[in-house]
Image (cartoon, rainbow, N blue to C red):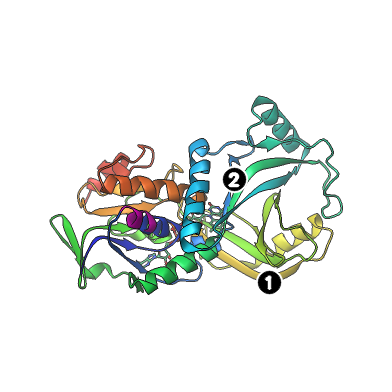
Amino acid sequence: MVVDVLVVGQGICGTFLAWNLENAGLSYKVIDAPLPNTASKSAAGIINPVTGRRIVKTWMIDEILPFARQQYTLLGAQLGISCIRETDIIDFFTSPQMRLSFLKRHGEDPTFLFKPEDESGWLSHFKYDFGYGVIQPCLQVELANILATFRRGLEHKQQLISGKFDFQKLVIEGNTVSYDDIHASSIVFCDGNEGAVNPFFKALPFAPNKGEALIVHIPELPAGHIYKKGLNLAPMGENLFWAGSTYEWDFKNSHPSEAFRNNTLQLLENWLRGPVELVDHIASIRPATLERRPFAGFHPVHTCVGILNGMGSKGCSLAPYFAMQLVQQITGQGNIDREADIQRFRNLLFRP
Ligand SMILES: Cc1cc2nc3c(=O)[nH]c(=O)nc-3n(C[C@H](O)[C@H](O)[C@H](O)COP(=O)(O)OP(=O)(O)OC[C@H]3O[C@@H](n4cnc5c(N)ncnc54)[C@H](O)[C@@H]3O)c2cc1C
């Protein structure tokens, strides 16, 4: 069988890559190991336009937010599902300093920030001492639904090989690759955290970090917002909320930890007025990078071997944009932004 591109991995990167290939009229197969706790299956799906203690705009957000909104809407229309919803973040200040920070930033540039006149509006649901601001608009992506529906479509079209990719079986012949009976013009690895041990790309400066979250049932909390006070509380439907997360660079394993569970339940008890019931506890590794920029493009030596990875904590917003750029590069219609193109590491990748 001959295809244009072999895609390894069907997280949010592999999904958007495959979808863009399809829209560009290119043929492809996806190989994906159906693991339960991948980053995309653990994420809350939040696209937050601001970041950090100084509440500055997220990298490239002016381009990336409207693009993501449009792409998820189109994808949803094609899949016949809801992929995204517009929302806001009720940002409860954790200290007087955080309140000042928000007000200062609001004074400098109010884009994405709203300061309510009356800050007592959430007192029947939450305990808070320093007021709140609102971050808007934000997006929340329905990752579980997207991944599962897209996967079913791939299965239906016989474009999915479910299982682990075996590097021993990959043969690179000049400008083409073969894997079992599949011959392709290129192969693109969207293997998430496994990228850090991928024989072609392990030299790239990955900086994986672990994140955990609880799934909790909160019967009385309105589901129309994301709430934040140190941790995020994001609605997942049916009165379920995703509560997280942590960023751990020095971790021993990817398992859920008792310390996180106890600490988060305590935080929720101190914050919420109503009852909270623990439903699940998840943990995963984010495929983050040292300089917090994605890895997209083709290997300088093995020019038919590509990568779309390194999305860190921003996969929902960055994957659609850089999947589009990678496919434009494949079809000769555009280039990848220099900050994301792995050509910036060509010296590292040239080393044997
Ligand atoms: C707790 C947590 C919360 C997060 N919250 C958010 C959020 O709210 N918003 C946001 O934008 N981002 C969030 N992120 C980050 C986001 O999840 C990642 O940026 C994104 O999911 C990465 O997607 P990916 O496709 O690169 O990798 P993955 O989702 O890990 O997908 C990789 C896929 O490749 C497959 N695979 C790997 N190796 C092989 C192989 N050898 N053979 C076959 N298949 C293979 C895996 O099974 C998997 O399906 C969060 C991450 C975590 C851990």
Q: Please report the residue visible at 28 percent of the width from the left and 42 percent of the height from the top.
A: 333
Q: Which residue is mark 2?
A: 48
User: Quick one: SS at disc 1?
Assistant: strand
Query: Where residue 192 appears, x then y in whole percent?
Result: 42, 58
Instruction: Tell whether 312 sits left or right of 274.
Output: left
User: In this rendering, does residue 160 appear at all?
Assistant: yes
| Mark 2 residue crowding within 10 angstroms, few (<14) / some (14–19) / many (20+) | many
- Which amino acid lies under the numbered mark 2 shown in the image of this protein? Asn
Determine whether the beta carbon of the residue marked 2 sits less than 8 angstroms from the nearest atom of ligand 1: yes
Instruction: Tell whether 10 sits left or right of 250.
Output: left
Quadrant of the rendering where the N terminus is positioned: bottom left
Q: Which contiguous range is marked in magenta?
A: 19-24
Determine whether the beta carbon of the residue marked 1 sits less than 8 angstroms from the nearest atom of ligand 1: no
Q: Considering depth in this image, is 335 or 94 the residue closer to the camera?
A: 335
Q: Please report the residue visible at 33 percent of the width from the left and 48 percent of the height from the top.
A: 326
Q: Is residue 22 magenta?
A: yes
- Which amino acid lies under the numbered mark 1 shown in the image of this protein? Val
| Mark 1 residue crowding within 10 angstroms, few (<14) / some (14–19) / many (20+) | few
Q: Which tag, 1 or 2, sits closer to the chain's start?
A: 2
Instruction: Tell whether 157 sits left or right of 292.
Output: left
Query: Where residue 258 appears, x then y in whole percent?
Result: 65, 68
Q: Quarter of the image holding residue 235?
A: bottom right
User: Quick one: SS at disc 2?
Assistant: loop
Q: Considering depth in this image, is 249 or 228 the residue closer to the camera?
A: 228
For residue 270, the mark is none
Would you say the magenta stretch is mainly helix, strand or loop?
helix
Query: Where residue 218 appears, x then y in whole percent?
Result: 76, 65
For residue 279, the mark is 1
Q: Please report the residue visible at 46 percent of the width from the left and 47 percent of the height from the top.
A: 318
